[in-house]
Amino acid sequence: MGTEVTHAIADGILGGGVYALMAAGLTLIFGVLDIINVAQGIMVVLGAYLSYVLSVHLHLNVLTGLLITVPVMFVIGVAIHWLFIRPLRGSERTSMTLLACFAVALITEGILYWRFGSNYVSLHNSYSESSVHVLGFYLADIYLIGFGLAVAAIAALYLILYRTTFGRAVRATMQNQTAARLVGIDVTRVAAVTFGIGTAVTAVGGMVFGSINSFTPNSGYDLISRLLAIVILAGMGSIGGALVAAVLMTTAEALVDIWQPDWAVAVFYLAMVIILTVRPGGLFGRRAVRAQ
Amino acid sequence: MLASPGAARSLRIAGVAALIALAALFPILFPNPTATNFGVVTLIFVAVTSAWNIFSGYSGYLSLGHAVFYGTGAYFLVVAARDWHLTGSAIFWLLPLGGLAAALIAVPVGLIALRVRRHTFVVITIAFFFIAQLSAGNLSVTGGSSGLLVPVPNNWDPATYNNPFYYVGLIIAVATVALAVAIRRSRYGLQLRAIRDDEDRAAGLGVRAMPVKLSALVLSAFITGMAGALWVYFIGQAVPQFVFDPLFDLAVVLMGFFGGLGTVAGPVLGALVLEPSQLWLNLQESNGYTSEILFGALFLVVILFLPRGVLPTAAEYITAGRARLLRRREQQQGAPGAQAPTPAAGSAP
């Protein structure tokens, strides 16, 4: 029993890191652009399929493959922003961009069905077969590698945001777009690059997700609903909060899974609903809920 | 051409009456089961899209979780028909109860979700949708992931089997649209639209925002639940992934946007155009992804180029055209009156 619980907690924390990374991209895009990118889930699946193609057809190591998939996902993110998000303006912009992202998700899902069919596939690699022995149980290497990658990527996001000129421009845009434009920041470029970065993290997330789970083009719905629950629980726009919320949620899920496997996923949404009734802004949300 | 307001009104009433008469005669004109099948599903979507519009279109709070209410109504009908041993047309009496069940679910959903502002609201409705889907897949009362069968009437004549569903759907659809008209013209509808335009200012002017928003959501959920109950009886089975289908939410929103959000005729037009085309496309290409890709592409086109919908955009063109016509006529009438039909008069503004 004790081992089971420790194992669940370890699984939860390590798995939470990967969700935190995907959610960080989502919450970054929200913070800078005021856009709820509901396509993030299917982008993770797209990232997983890209890794799958590279490893099956080009026999690339999944970690080496990231050198290709991360830039590709970045370009896809910038393209989505340029084509479908940038032209949308006006008072209904937040709702319209959300629907545009939903449409992009639908098209991407359709294309994935067309190319890969609806059968479950998984990313086979040496890391999901080898494992290390800790505290009386075995942990697959991919969990540790995924967690390490996620932490490194989130740290990189923090460094970019708080230690570079570009990061300062991003934060200025987050606080006040008009003022940012007045001091000479190219807000459109900042927005495009932010969308690109927010999407690029799904390449890493997708690789780890695909190595741990088997997936179909339909997996995007499950992912996006979990990611949205994490982001709402954390408070929209907070990257650090996303990390805490993700680890909390996945650990709770892993613990419930020991006794009630069918209801484990429900923990995500129940936690979200309970928090929202007490704190409508989320755990780490800005105190004043942003006015429309 | 330029009719008086009274004449325009009677023209509009005649148009609506003709449309309803045409809809009532449709199963007689096209008795083909495929056609009436399309008709039933399309009428269900007319009702649901109008009901969605009464809440989301009027108040500006976009709900992407109406499938929760649709599915609640559907499961209520299936379980009640089984437990109360109802068969045949007696099952139709369960529709209002299914709507009531959905309305009951809408109260806590609204109390939680309507406390936050618009973009968080959209996300929370999505989350509620997934909670509902998950519960339907795991609870024993819904038959779990394998679902439940509905006792469909087996002694009805196959040739006219769809007709009872069609006329019940027509009644619900017409009643919903009439309700949408009534609300739009009422003080209540004005309050809803004031909330859409500026909630803080509306509250400052004395609109009690929460009761107004919540009642609109509950009303919308009631109709959606009835439509869901009718749909499940028509389909004959309830499986979680079809009863709680994310594409349903998107379809409703697309139909509303396509026709014109917040208008009365827009959602009706959207449902009448898009639902049959989608059904037809699914008949041609059964692979599923073709319609998915086209659906998404159409959605993008509407959002990017017709963000206010087909009807408001068309109305703008007509108004602009009329104004141009009026101006030209005034010029023509003005020119002889001035008794100076010189070429210069033609270019005067």
Image (cartoon, grey):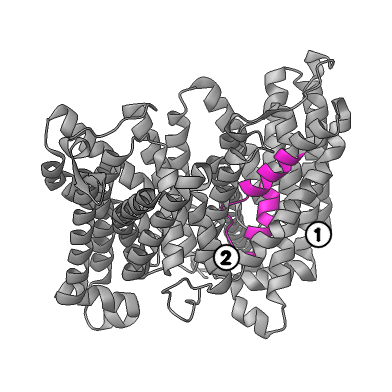
Residue at 62%, 46% in the rendered image: B67
Q: Is residue A138 visible?
A: yes
Image position, residue B140 (x, y; %): 66, 37
Q: Secondary structure at mark 2?
A: loop
Q: Which residue is mark 2?
A: B341
Q: Chain of mark 1?
A: B
**Front-lying residue, B301 or A11:** A11
For label 1, count other residues whose C-alpha is less than 10 Å away and answer few (under 14), some (14-19) or many (20+). Answer: some
Identity of the residue drawn at 45% across and 23% down: B287
- Chief SS of the magenta region: helix
- Whether residue B2 appears in this view of the structure is no
Measured as percent of width and height from the top left, residue A181 is found at 28, 78
Numbered circle sitting on residue B182: 1
Q: Is residue A227 left or right of residue B4?
A: left
Q: Is residue B182 left or right of residue B231?
A: right
Which residues are the magenta region? Answer: B49-76
Q: Position of residue A263 (x, y in %)?
A: 53, 46
Of helix, strand and loop, which one carries label 1? helix
Which amino acid is tagged 2?
Pro
